Image: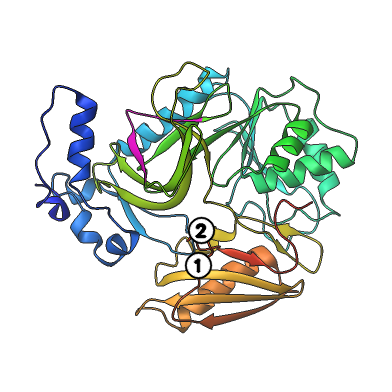
Amino acid sequence: EWVPYYRTVPRVRRCRDPQAAIEATLSEIGPLEKTTYRDHPDLLLSRALPRHRWHRGQTSGTTGTALQLWYSPDAFAEEYASVWRMRRRFGVAPSDPHMTFGGRLIVPLRETKPPFWRTDTALNQTLFSLSHMSPQNLPAYIDAIHATEATYAQGYPSSLHLVARALLDAGRPLPKGRLEAVFTSSETVLANQRAVIEAGFGTRILDRYGASELAVSMTACDEGRLHVDMEFCIVEVEIQERGPGWVRGPLLVTGFANRATPFVRYRIGDIGTRLEGPCACGRAGDVFESIDGRLEDYVMTPDGRTIGRLDHVFKSLTDIAEAQLIQPAVDRLRVCVVPQPTYSEASERALLHELRARLGQEIGISIERVEEIPREANGKLRAVKSLIGRRGET
């Protein structure tokens, strides 16, 4: 009753079997679409939490759509608890030194000489710039990686793959056992990326699936599968495919962590493959073989850099409904945007600024306003569509 959108939702079903009660209750609630939330966010805001206690944020814009979000103060604690429960299980502590290959701008693009990384002493981490990973600069990355006292690495698979390939090509992979693990998130780890990353960093990959909405969390086990953190969320699969021992389809997530904007049966936009039987690791609950719906391409620049995970360009641009980057040639990039009514010339300048900050001045960028962006055969929108080379082919 505290959330206007859910005031008409049927009451919780009562059954002797708790799982049956959950399934019966959820079956009577229609899926929540991203467009519904985007167009009417006030309907999802809980009146039980005073407005001054909300924390504001945005989605990361994986599909080119940034959503305004609000969080309750304890939501982040719940998120970090699920992350660190997994990491502690594999011998890593929050105070351990580590390397981070994430989406933040660490070093201005105008910098042409190393260091292309910065040290955060408070969190005991070395943050590496993703925007300077050209063939000419990667030898400096290799030296820095070997010089760190890191016990683990974390970041985007696309960036870790580039660095790991450089380590292997230089004949300087990290010795086995030097790192406890490589923790990946935010992108799907492709099979060939996994092999290269694990060989280059001398350790195993442990993945986690989460979202900016703080409505879902899955963490890796010893078998390399993703287990739903049951105290954090419920994950349903809208089954589109079925095979021996598995089902696949779009995910509906119901989160328990964020009291400011509760998401119930939220169609998050990703596709997953869930196993129908228990995992060999012995951990209880639903287990997923993979999350299949977050594949992106790289953008290649004329000076030889390969840039992945450009969804951060759209993170703060909430006046863009959808966007797609299309690269027809190494020196050209088309940016198709579906504008919101508030979209303006200032929005376009901000978008161009964000792209230039990551891609530089040598690549030609054209921005086109379109009414809609075609989906792929699987129903997903590809945020980056390269016509000169697909991610994971090298």
Query: Residue at horizontal 53%, vertical 72%?
Result: 351
**Is residue 210 among the parts visible in the rendering?**
no
Query: Residue at horizontal 66%, vertical 22%?
Result: 180
Mark number, residue 40: none
Magenta range is 226-237
- Give the amino acid type for the residue marked by disc 2 in the picture: Asn
Is 256 magenta? The answer is: no
Query: Residue at horizontal 73%, vertical 42%?
Result: 192
Give yes or no for contact between labels 2 and 1 (Cβ–Cβ under 8 Å): yes
Residue ID for mark 2: 378
- Give the amino acid type for the residue marked by disc 1 in the picture: Arg
Which residue is most to the front?
244
Q: Position of residue 21 (x, y in %)?
A: 18, 31
Q: Is residue 304 above or below residue 231?
A: below
Residue ID for mark 1: 375
Q: Is residue 241 above or below residue 305?
A: above
Which residue is most to the right?
171
Relative to 170, 97 lies left or right: left
Q: Secondary structure at mark 1?
A: loop
